[in-house]
Amino acid sequence: MLDKIKSMADNEKFKAAGAKIKNIFQFGRELCKNAYKYIYSIFDSGGKALYEMGISANTVTVAGFIIGLLAINFLAMNMFGYALLCILINRACDALDGAIAKYAGKTDFGVFLDAALDYMFYAGVIFGFALANPPQNAVAAVFLMFGFIAAAASLLSYAIIAYKNNAPQQPEIGTSPFYLGGIAQGSETLAALIILCIVPNLFMPIAIILGCLSLVKAFSVIVTAYYNFVIAPRKKSQAGADNVSSAS
C-alpha cells in the first residue's frame, strides 16, 4: 500500500495535478486579498464622507443594530431574502462605524457600544433561525447559543482582567464571538449567515459546526488566560529572583 502511494506521489501527472491545485489556491488567496483591499477602500471612503457630514460612529452603530434586529422578524416569517438584506446592512454599518471612528477618533463608549450590540445582533440572528423552524432548528440553535455564550463570556472575562493588569495581550472584544483566528474569522461568520439565508435547511449542521468552533474558542481563551495570568508571571518572578541571586 505504501509503495503504491509512493509511486503515485512520484508520478508526473500527480505532481502536475498537485501543482495546479496549489496554483488555484494561491490565485484564490490573492483574489480574496485584492477584493478585501477594494472593499476596505470603499468603506473607508464612505466612513470619511459620513464623518465630514457630521454623522457619528455611534449613530451608524445604533442604526445598523436596529436594522439587524429586523432580520429576526423576517427569519421567523421565513422571509430569508429580506433577512439576508438586513444582515448585510448590519454588517456594512459595522464596517462603516469603524471607518468613521478612524477619522473621528475612537472612544471607550464607542468601542463598548459596538461590541455589545454586535453580540446582541448575533444572538438575535440565532433566535430568528430557531423561530423559522422550531421543531428542526431549536436544539441546534440552543447548542449554538451555548457555544456563543461560552466564547463571549471567556473573551470578555479575559479582557476585564487584561485591562485591569494593563496587559498587552488584551484581545479585541469587538470581534465576533465566532472569530477563531484563522479558523472562523469574521468573514467566514458572515459567509455562514449568507449560506443559511440562501439554504436555510442547512441550519442544523452549520449551527453545530459553529457551536463546536465557539467552544474551541472558549477553551483556547481559558488556556491563554492561564498562561498569561499564571504561568507567565511565575516565570517572570522566577527570572527576577535568578537575576538577583546571580548579582549577589
Image (tube, rainbow, N blue to C red):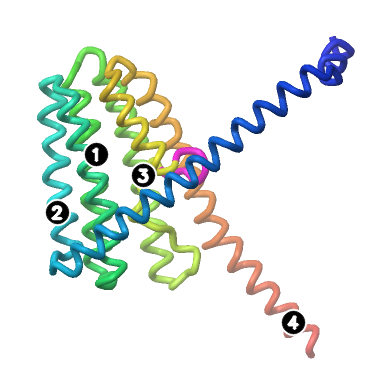
Of the residues tagged 4 and 3, which is closer to the observer?
3
Question: Which residue was labeled with disc 2?
Answer: 62
Marks 4 and 3 sit apart, C-alpha to C-alpha, by: 41 Å
User: Chief secondary structure of the magenta span?
Assistant: loop
Determine the image quadrant of residue 79.
top left
Decide whether residue 227 is among the magenta residues: no
Of the residues tagged 1 and 4, which is closer to the observer?
1
Residue extending farthest to the right is 3
Q: Amino acid at mark 1?
A: Leu
Query: Which class describes the residues within 10 Å of circle 4: few (<14), some (14-19), or many (20+)?
Result: few
Is 240 located above or below residue 45 in the figure?
Answer: below
First along the sequence among labels 4 and 3: 3
Q: Secondary structure at mark 2?
A: helix
Query: Which class describes the residues within 10 Å of circle 1: few (<14), some (14-19), or many (20+)?
Result: some
Residues rendered magenta in the picture: 179-184
First along the sequence among labels 1 and 2: 2
Query: Which class describes the residues within 10 Å of circle 3: few (<14), some (14-19), or many (20+)?
Result: many
Question: Which residue was labeled with disc 3?
Answer: 177
Residue at x 19% of width, y 34% of height: 85
Question: Which residue was labeled with disc 4?
Answer: 243
Can you tell which mark lies on residue 88? 1
Q: Amino acid at mark 3?
A: Pro
Of the residues tagged 1 and 2, which is closer to the observer?
1
Determine the image quadrant of residue 204.
top left
First along the sequence among labels 1 and 4: 1
